[in-house]
Amino acid sequence: MWKPPERIRHPLPEPGWPSAVAAAGSRLFSPLEVGRLRLRNRTWVPAMVPWRATESGFVTPEVVAWYERFARGRPAALVVEATGIRDVPSGPLLRVGDDRFVGGLAELVAAVRRASGGETRLLLQILDFLVIRRRPEREKYLSRFLTVTPRHLARLGVANEEAAREALARCSEAELEAVLSPRELEALRFGYRERVTDLHLQHVAALPRALTGLFAAAAGRAEAAGFDGVELHCAHAYTLASFLSARNDRTDGYGGSRAARVRLPVEVLERVRASVGGGFVVGLRMLAEECIEGGSGVDDAAFFAVELARAGADFLSLSRGGKFEDAKQPKVGAAAYPYTGPSGYECMPTAISDARGPFGRNLAAVRTVRAALRAAGLATPVVAAGGIGTFAQAEEILASGTADVVAAARQSLADPDWFEKVRRGRGAEVRRCIYSNYCEGLDQMHKQVTCQLWDRQDLDEPDLLRSRDGRRRLVAPRWRAEE
């Protein structure tokens, strides 16, 4: 992962743990009822990808155990990981692109209902992504993958494809830079990656026509499986986020201006809303800032938020960064990972950081977006996330009007019971995240995600689910709460 030039170690913020009486009267544990989004309090576990599905995208016992463990901590809302809407291979990520996935998802829903006593609202995050390939070996790319064109022949001064490939094999890096286009060099050095602006590709040009139906069908399956709602993934490096990006210069009415860039997410939202029941929640995850050169900023996010809220979004959950455009070059045989560059750091900063530090790094932008909604007369709830792990932080976020709901991913992974411990006045027992990003490192390698604070603990526990190598536990130790 990218590291900032400044290397300042930031201590964990003072938690401000309340007594049970104080917690009962707090903003964090007050109910939220705005439109269809009705929560018993303001606690939220956002989507995390744990790499526990089958290679075909089906729910496994390990997937069920992962969400059941979070549900035992009784957050008001729990968002299930990014789940693909297409029926295409995508590795050990959940999928909802066909009716055959509904049964496993229904099993997951039932487990969460049991574990939380029916208190946790369950949402499925659904997404689309474009093609990305692994970084190839230089010889293989130049001899097989590169499409040789007349432009290459002219630049190399040869007459045919065979001679061109022989000449390319002899080229130095500097010579290759003079012969290959920027996109060809990228495919060589990082791996091929489609963009929403590749209108020469028929399936990319057709995305606005295809995605509305795909998202609507996926939402319908989520409803059939028993979820309370869906979260449309419009953040980070995925398709809908790329339509929102200031880098989207499509010329077909879906790129360029802000109004054109938000057009497809609005159309998807409206189609999904029309395809599900009246009480089914439909919200969005989006970026408060892209944090890349030429990318969208907070003013763009504020505009998008207002348009999406007017189109019927039941909530807006705000993240930041996590883009391919500044990702670190992967090793040969690996694919680029959108959290390895500066924008990825903005999404998941560590305790060793720059002067701004890792805690609440997204909050100023979240506050701006929410203020724009309220100025437009819209009451759409805003979910804040990013380096939040204490009661004191959460209360300040809610008291200041920065957000309406507080989400915590890494802290909830460190201690799935932390919200419940705080509610009971037992904050001193919270296992606090140290923001080392051990979890993110596992995610980057597509290994089953765990937390370094507990994954080697009590490995002799009966019937313990272990990682594929047998060295780590897959769910946090149970909290032996006093009744």
Image (tube, rainbow, N blue to C red):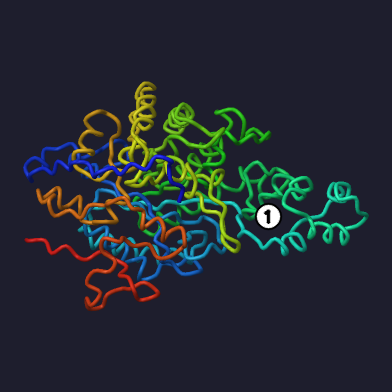
**Relative image position of residue 195 (x, y in whole percent):** 63, 45
Instruction: Specify the quadrant of the image occupied by residue 21.
Output: top left
**Relative image position of residue 272 (x, y in whole percent):** 48, 45
**Viewed as shown, does residue 139 lie left or right of 392?**
right
Count the marks: how many?
A: 1
The residue at 46%/31% (across/down) is 301
**Relative image position of residue 239 (x, y in whole percent):** 55, 46
Instruction: Work out which residue is located at the far top of the displayed protein and give it.
Output: 375
The residue at 19%/42% (across/down) is 391
Q: Which of 149 and 214 is in front in this view?
A: 149
Instruction: Specify the quadrant of the image occupied by residue 331.
Output: bottom right
**Viewed as shown, does residue 256 lie left or right of 379?**
right
Is any atom of residue 103 visible in this view? no
Quadrant occupied by the C terminus: bottom left
In the displayed structure, 234 sits above or below 108; it is above
Q: Which of 39 and 362 is in front in this view?
A: 362
Instruction: Work out which residue is located at the far right of the displayed protein and give it.
Output: 159
Q: Residues within 10 Å of mark 1 (few under 14, many from 20)?
A: many
Is any atom of residue 454 visible in this view? yes
Instruction: Specify the quadrant of the image occupied by residue 370.
Output: top left
**Viewed as shown, does residue 17 lie left or right of 455?**
left
**Relative image position of residue 399 (x, y in whole percent):** 21, 30
Q: Nearer the viewer, residue 430 or 55?
A: 430
Q: Which amino acid does label 1 sit on?
A: Leu
- Residue linked to disc 1: 188
Q: What element carries label 1?
A: helix
In the displayed structure, 303 sits above or below 77; it is above
